Image (cartoon, helix red, strand yellow):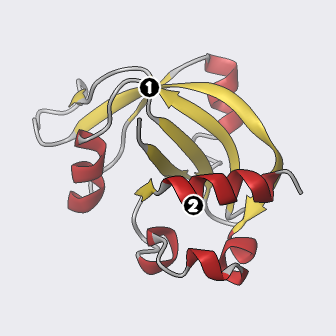
Amino acid sequence: MAYWLLKTEPEEYSYSDLELNGSTVWNGVSNALALKHLRTMTIGDLALIYHTGKERRIIGVAEVTSQPYPDPKLDDVKRVVVDLRPLQRVPQPVSLAQIKQDSSFADFDLLRLPRLSVVPVSQSHWQRLLQLSKG
């Protein structure tokens, strides 16, 4: 199992929308590196859902429920999607400011590559982020 952080604009699609819908097709990814990461996802991988924009914080955890497949709405086999389902909200959202203040995240791609929308998360970073979400 691998761990990920997936960014979304909450005005376009929020974690609340994912909870309400029960599942979603995670689409709209166009960056080459983000697509490369998306192609390596597998069923059972876990993803932190991160709200961008004014919020800039981790909101919840989702599970990948499909292998990557071509986006059915596009005529481009390079643009892939995965299906997600919500697992749970984090007890307390983890802000970007909190992550930046923690020296254990110095090598975290969320900070190193801030425009990347699909970010791999190491097991140690995953555990630390969940720890931060507990207050």
Left or right of residue 8: residue 83 = left
Mark 1 or mark 2: whose residue is earlier in sequence: 1
Which secondary structure, mark 2? helix
Q: Nearer the viewer, residue 133 or 9?
A: 133
Q: Residues within 10 Å of mark 1 (few under 14, many from 20)?
A: some
Q: Residue at x 49, y 24 (%)?
A: 24
Q: Which residue is mark 2?
A: 125
On screen, 115 above or below 47? below
Q: Position of residue 49 (x, y in %)?
A: 59, 46
Amino acid type shown at disc 1: Gly
Count how many numbered circles sit on residues in the image: 2
Of the pair 128 and 110, the residue shown nearer to us: 128
Please identify the quarter of the rendering in which residue 55 is found: bottom right
Q: Quadrant of residue 42?
A: top left
- Residue beneath the point at 21% across and 51% down: 36
Report the residue that reaches farthest toward the right: 135
Counting from the top left corner in percent of width and height, residue 73 is at 25, 27
- Name the residue: 63% across, 64% down: 53
Q: Amino acid at mark 2?
A: His
Q: Which residue is mark 1?
A: 44
Q: Quadrant of the N terminus?
A: top left
- The residue at 19%/41% (across/down) is 79
Helix or strand or loop: what does disc 1 sit on? Answer: loop
Front-most of residues 12 and 130: 130
Please determine whether, in this image, residue 76 is positioned above or below residue 64.
below
Q: Position of residue 57 (x, y in %)?
A: 70, 60
Assess disc 2: are there few (<14), some (14-19) or many (≥20) residues with their C-alpha within 10 Å of its C-alpha.
Answer: some
Q: Is residue 8 above or below residue 104?
A: above
* Quadrant including the C terminus: bottom right
Residue 19, numbered circle = none
Residue 5 position in % (x across, y down): 51, 52
Instruction: Say left or right for 134 vs 57.
Output: right
